[in-house]
Image (cartoon, rainbow, N blue to C red):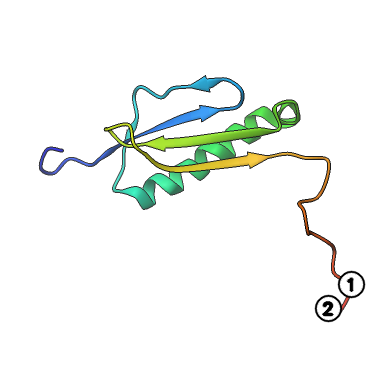
Amino acid sequence: MLEGRLPRYYFHTENGDRIRDDQGEELAGVDAAREEAVTVLGEILRYRGASFWTTRSFSVIVTDAEGQTVVSVTASASDTAPEGWRLSEAGQ
């Protein structure tokens, strides 16, 4: 990395189809890449709306300039609650 340049991160998506990010974005570091990954995922889910239910999951995989995964975030949909989840009784 050149002196004074920010690292570049690439935000690839996966929902049954893989979409590669060839442009990337310069960000201050991994923490900024994490925040951007969540923002990107939220925007995609908002755009997809009800069609998200047909794919059941969507991921944003962030890689650095060397192609190493630095973070990934996935949203998934289900018609059932997660294993072990239950609604607590009032007052508990």
Residue 11 x/y as whole percent? 43, 32
Numbered label tally: 2
Residue 53 x/y as whole percent? 75, 31
Please rate how many residues cluster around mark 1, counting C-alpha atoms within 10 Å: few if below 14, some from 14 to 19, many from 20. few
Q: Which mark is residue 62?
A: none
Please rate how many residues cluster around mark 2, counting C-alpha atoms within 10 Å: few if below 14, some from 14 to 19, many from 20. few
Please name the residue shown 86% across and 79% down the image: 91
Residue found at the far bottom of this picture: 91
> Which quadrant is home to the N terminus?
top left
Residue found at the far right of this picture: 89
Q: Vertical placement of 67 versus 71: above or below?
A: above
Residue found at the far front of this picture: 83
Cβ–Cβ under 8 Å for marks 1 and 2: yes
Q: Which residue is mark 1?
A: 89
Residue 50 x/y as whole percent? 76, 30
Direction from residue 3 to residue 10 in the image, left or right: right
Give the image quarter of residue 7: top left
Name the kind of residue labelled 2 in the image: Gln
Name the kind of residue labelled 1 in the image: Glu
Disc 2 is placed on an element classified as loop
Q: Which residue is mark 2?
A: 92
Q: Nearer the viewer, residue 82 or 47?
A: 82
Please name the residue shown 17% across and 40% down the image: 5
> Which quadrant is home to the C terminus?
bottom right
Q: Vertical placement of 50 versus 86: above or below?
A: above
Please name the residue shown 13% across and 44% down the image: 4
Direction from residue 63 to residue 47 in the image, left or right: right
